[in-house]
Image (spheres, rainbow, N blue to C red):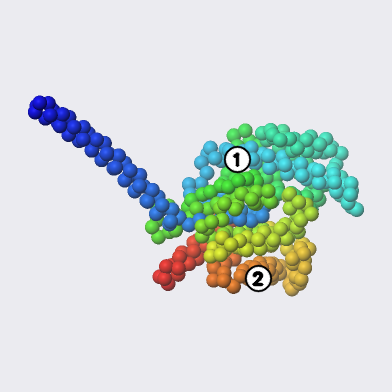
Amino acid sequence: MLSHLSRSMGLLCSRNRRYNKQDTEENVQAAEIERRIVQETEAEKHIQKLLLLGAGESGKSTIFKQIKLLFQTGFDEAELKSYIPVIHANVYQTIKVLHDGSKELAQNDIEFSKYVLSSENKDIGEKLSDIGGRLDYPRLTREHAHDIETLWNDAAIQETYARGNELQVPDCAHYFMENLQRLSDVNYIPTKEDVLYARVRTTGVVEIQFSPVGENKKSGEVYRLFDVGGQRNERRKWIHLFEGVTAVIFCAAISEYDQTLFEDEQKNRMMETKELFEWVLKQECFEKTSFMLFLNKFDIFEKKVLQVPLSVCEWFRDYQPVSTGKQEIEHAYEFVKKKFEELYFQTTSPDRVDRVFKVYRTTALDQKLVKKTFKLVDETLRRRNLLEAGLL
């Protein structure tokens, strides 16, 4: 009886030891999971959220690609190759817009004869317009590149290109048309510059994490940048991103004051940008959010403003030119900048006037300028963090 009891107790103790060991292992695993959650939560606290907003064609996605090139590893060969169909599509789409635009102008313009294609190029134009209207585009061959180059050099197409602001001709048109032979090479791999010029409409949300002083440098802030679709039908996807944003980077393409929207050809692009900026400023969740305004596409603006008066845009009706050349370009830029600043302060309620607001002149295709701009943004946000912590 006693020996049976001893054996039973021994088995019970042995079982308890086994259970205790299992419990201990489970507790260690649970503690490790808990530690990781705390660690990740703590790490997330130090990641600053940047929201890249703006209307369609404002240059947001080019800025996004520059960040990848500047502060991450850039694009590997597979990523570069993935842009081949995008670039070839851009070429076909561009020549279709120009061909169809020349036909429209030849029918409706007073000086219609300027826009009539030469007889030997009419068949080429129809063929390329047909390709450009497809849902899937063929790879750009030498033969197609030769046809496109022939059509591009036609006087009627050049006259049409000069009126590109009326026809939704993309900014990349001239660059790609001047590089057709390289783009159609059988062994073609896009360059970084090709990728920056490539136009693909952003749908949904894409994000990237970076530090403007390089990876793993303790002195630098870590940012998570979100790029969202700029077209009207994409904007409803922004809403869930608005919470917990450190700064909004708003891109405004200042060169587009004489152009209309891709999705609504009755609406001036600059007026759309004005209304969108105003709407974003009024959002409750941005009460304490810093605003970085990128007045983008300055490279196009400085050429255009000497040819097309700012006053063609309703918002800039009161603009008065004062000079010519560089002086006039600066005067026009300062006028546009002041318009945005006035809009900001008119729209900002008194309880929000202490939030950070900075304006930067940008050209998204200029890598050095983008790098310099983001270093300035980084310094501004770091200073704000120190002020909030009472360290300045």
The first of marks 1 and 2 along the sequence is 1
Classed neighbour count for the residue bearing mark 1: other residues with Cα under 10 Å, few (<14), some (14–19), many (≥20):
some
User: What residue lies at 64% left-to-right and 50% top-to-bottom?
Assistant: 236
User: What residue lies at 80% left-to-right and 49% top-to-bottom?
Assistant: 160
- The answer for how far apart the CA atoms under marks 1 and 2 are is 42 Å
Seen from the viewer's position, the closer of residues 13 and 289 is 13
Q: Position of residue 302 (x, y in %)?
A: 69, 62
Query: On screen, 391 above or below 142?
Result: below
Quarter that holds the C terminus? bottom left
Q: Residue 346 carries which label?
A: 2
Q: Mark 1 points at which residue?
A: 83
Q: Can residue 154 be seen in this view?
A: no
Query: On screen, 186 above or below 48?
Result: above
Q: Where is residue 371 in the image (x, y as percent from the top left)?
A: 53, 58
Q: What kind of element bears circle 1?
A: loop
218 vs 139, left or right, is left
230 vs 1, left or right, is right
The image quarter containing residue 251 is bottom right
Spot the residue most to the left. 2
Classed neighbour count for the residue bearing mark 2: other residues with Cα under 10 Å, few (<14), some (14–19), many (≥20):
few
> What amino acid is at disc 2?
Gln
User: What residue lies at 69% left-to-right and 62% top-to-bottom?
Assistant: 274
For the image, the number of numbered tags is 2
Seen from the viewer's position, the closer of residues 115 and 207 is 207
Quarter that holds the N terminus? top left
Q: Which mark is residue 347?
A: none
> What amino acid is at disc 1?
Tyr
Q: What kind of element bears circle 2?
A: helix
Q: Position of residue 336 (x, y in %)?
A: 68, 67
Q: Can residue 366 be seen in this view?
A: yes
